[in-house]
Amino acid sequence: MIRKLIEKTRSVRRFQENKRIGIDQLRQLVHLARFGGSARNAQPLKYMIVTESKLRERIFNLLKWAGYLKDWPGPDRGERPVAYIVCMLDRKRCKGPEREAHFDLGIASQNILLGAAEQGIYGCRIAAFSRDISKILYLEERYKVILVLALGYPAEKVVIEKLKKDGDIRYWRDEKNVHHVPKRSLEDILLPVKKLPFE
């Protein structure tokens, strides 16, 4: 059922680094991305799959992990992603403002993460990274890296929490390293239709 799949598709930042993901599996996840909607049907996104260990290490060092966890620099060795899908904007295919591509990116990345979760693979969208990533991937000027998807089999538990009355949306880790993510309730995000004054 799609609801259960969506509910279990959570951001994971600690992985079983000794458990690999096959290249065919990763290609099939990118295949899911291409079915997402695209503004003007421009389809300006391109992807690069990275699994080679030395390149993964170089990418890892350019990423910023979990902004709300100030004292956590990212996963330790043995818990790092086993694959990255680097998402890029192909400027030559962009038909409108670049910002339109971010709508496409949201759809495409969710397709990838849903497809991954169905196989027990989880990931994290990372948009905070050094621009040096383009250099280490030897990208042409036309390609702009806009998102990095870190992927692997999870080595942590993620729990959804009801947002407290103080409205604090920051995620946190407890003493057992369980990751807690507050979410707003349906009542909080759903506005009623108001009667217009002339009705």
Image: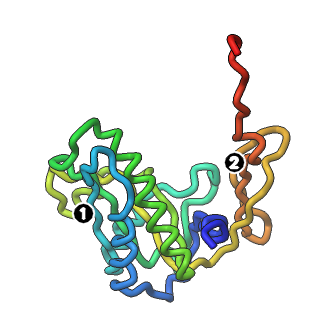
Callout 2 crowding tier (Cα within 10 Å): few <14, some 14–19, many ≥20: few
Please state the horizontal and vertical placement of residue 42, each as a whole percent of the image. 24, 49
In the rendered image, which residue does mark 2 sit on? Answer: 170
Q: Secondary structure at mark 2?
A: loop
Image height of 152 relative to 139, above or below: below
Task: Tell me the amino acid under the disc marked 1.
Answer: Ile
Pick whichever of labels 1 and 2 is earlier in the sequence: 1
The one nearer the camera, 196 or 149, is: 196
Q: Secondary structure at mark 1?
A: helix
Q: Are marks 1 and 2 in contact (CB under 8 Å)?
A: no
Residue drawn at point x = 39 percent, y = 87 percent: 22
Mark number displayed over residue 72? none
Residue drawn at point x = 73 percent, y = 69 percent: 177
Please state the horizontal and vertical placement of residue 52, each as a whole percent of the image. 32, 80
Q: Quadrant of residue 175?
A: bottom right
Task: Tell me the amino acid under the disc marked 2.
Answer: Arg
Relative to 118, is 56 on the left or the right?
left
Callout 1 crowding tier (Cα within 10 Å): few <14, some 14–19, many ≥20: few
Residue positioned most to the front: 199
Please state the horizontal and vertical placement of residue 26, each as a whole percent of the image. 37, 78
The one nearer the camera, 196 or 28, is: 196
Residue drawn at point x = 54 percent, y = 73 percent: 122
In the rendered image, which residue does mark 1 sit on? Answer: 136
> Distance between the Cα atoms at labels 1 and 2?
32 Å
